[in-house]
Amino acid sequence: MTLDCKHVWSQVSEYIDGSVTAEMREAIERHLANCRHCSAVYDSTRNILVLVGDERTFEVPAGFGERLHGRLQAWMESADSRA
Amino acid sequence: MGERLVRPAVNPGGGQPPVAGSAAPREELANEAAIISRILAGERELFHDLIRPYERGLYLAAYSIVLNEADAEDIAQDAVIKAFKGLKNFRGEARFSTWLMAIALNEARSRWRKSSGVQMDFLSDGEDSGGDYTPAVLADWRYIPSQELERKELRQALREAIAKLSPEYREVLILRDVRGMSIAETAAATGVNEGLVKVRLFRARLAMQKLLAPTLGPKQRGFMGWLTRKAGGQ
């Protein structure tokens, strides 16, 4: 199987997920080994996703957990008093 | 989370293995079911422990829609109360976490619709039928290690890029690539089929690359160069 650049781009998300067929994976890897531009597209996409997935990118506000459980507990107790 | 770019690819979210349709381990589900039975039988304090592993996920799921910290926190709180009130209706067909996430997403969508005044059909794939979904084509890429996230400018750039995506793209990106949920779980939580999750994920990922790659990582410019230019007001 021979792929052009557009075909590789269309598969890059599933390739990152490891959900392409073995034949497709081999074809993509052959293309990436010989195409500087697609290699940069793949590397940049995956690098950006690693950064997006890092806990530091989206931090939960300080005290979030305490406030969440506090409100839940208060609701449970008020439900008791209503019963 | 892995730092190196190694082929073949691995799950960037660093969570569950990227296998569509992966099921929760039977033991985990049985344990979850046992805790839920005890809660329903009166040991309600256990509900705090049940939700604890998913707190951050609830916040992020809500944030992916409303893009506001205070609202996302409020939605997460409302979602756990709704989940507690509706626990007797939980059938155990999905993981508890998926069910809980779906409650938070529905609450967030509802608030987003009210606040934006826009009617949106999140279950429709009409918006997914066209468009130019091509990446930014670069000559090379300078790998950005996760340590650079200590710089608030990089974190800000990532958050701003995500904010430019439409809500239905943001939610799949957050659930899959930030929370590490499987395609099947993301589909169950968002209420769309797995095929549509994959399409949205593909487009969201390429859009992120297109928004960020030209400024962040080309070898001749790179993140350091981008920071310098930004500081210099260029």
Image: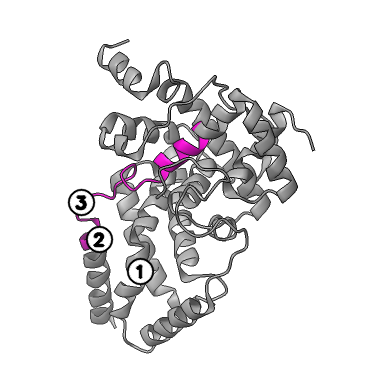
Label drawn at residue A65: 2
Q: Nearer the viewer, residue B143 or B194?
A: B143
Chain where mark 1 sits: B
**Quadrant where the C terminus of chain B lies?**
top left
**Residue A63 is covered by the magenta coloring:** yes
Residues shaded magenta: A44-67
The picture places residue B188, in percent across and down from the top left corner, at 57, 61
Q: Which element type, helix, strand or loop, lies under badge 3?
A: loop
The picture places residue B41, in percent across and down from the top left corner, at 38, 89
Identify residue type, mark 3. Answer: Ala
Examine the rendered structure and indicate whether residue B97 appears above or below residue B58. below
CA distance for labels 2 and 3:
8 Å
User: Can residue B200 be seen by looking at this rendering?
Assistant: no
Label drawn at residue B51: 1
Label drawn at residue A62: 3
Q: How is the image coloured?
A: one colour
Q: Which element type, helix, strand or loop, lies under badge 1?
A: helix
Identify residue type, mark 1. Answer: Ile
